[in-house]
Amino acid sequence: TNYKLARKDFRTLFDKKLRDNMYNSDDPALITKKFWSHVKFSSGSQRIPERMYRKECYRSTNLDKANLFNDFFCDQFSDSSNYNINVDYSNDNDFDISFCHRGIRRLLSNVNSNKANGPDGIHGKILKFCAVSLSYPLSLLFNLSY
């Protein structure tokens, strides 16, 4: 019975330390590593568990879990800055940039489609597989914008 009691106490202490470590945001660079360590430990494997919990909500469908991961990784980035700096563009002709549709197509074709969506919400697979169709309109848009 002493062994069972010691084992139960150890497990309780271990779970408490794991929770404390998981939600300690002193070092934001470690949050992702801690998250994956927790997922792997909780599931007992390298696979994503059947049901996941975050922000007081359970997710069990693949779409909901994918959105959970996307939200989690988007939360890791800081908010945009509030700097108010005036920039003089009157002599900006020295740095004219031309966006070629071939270069844009090459860049889009090399996008890693296994990565999560960016802040724009567009998945890498869409960018990669639609590179031919998107490159020319994007080159026009970039040239007009810049």
Image (spheres, rainbow, N blue to C red):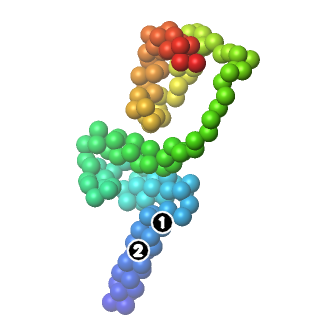
- Residue 15 at what x, y percent from top left? 40, 72
- Residue 110 at what x, y percent from top left? 56, 22
Query: Would residue 86 be found to the left or right of residue 119 on screen?
Result: right
Hey, which quadrant is residue 7 in on the image? Answer: bottom left
Q: Is residue 49 in sight in this rendering?
A: yes
89 up-or-down from 4: above or below? above
Residue at image point 47% right, 20% down = 128
Hey, which quadrant is residue 63 in on the image? Answer: top left
- Residue 54 at what x, y percent from top left? 33, 55
**Residue 24 image label:** 1
**Nearer-the-camera pick, 111 or 94:** 94
* Within-10-Å neighbours for mark 1: few <14, some 14–19, many 20+: few
* Within-10-Å neighbours for mark 2: few <14, some 14–19, many 20+: few
Q: Which element type, helix, strand or loop, lies under badge 2? A: helix
102 up-or-down from 87: above or below? above
Q: Quadrant of the N terminus?
A: bottom left
Query: Would residue 1 be found to the left or right of residue 108 on screen?
Result: left
Question: Which comes before the other along the chain, label 1 or label 2?
Answer: 2
Q: Quadrant of the C terminus?
A: top right
**Residue 113 image label:** none
**Residue 16 image label:** 2
Alpha-carbon span between mark 1 and mark 2: 12 Å
Residue at image point 74% right, 17% down = 94
- Residue 107 at what x, y percent from top left? 57, 20
**Nearer-the-camera pick, 92 or 77:** 92
Query: Would residue 7 be found to the left or right of residue 95 on screen?
Result: left
Q: Amino acid at mark 2?
A: Lys
Q: Nearer the viewer, mark 1 or mark 2?
A: 1
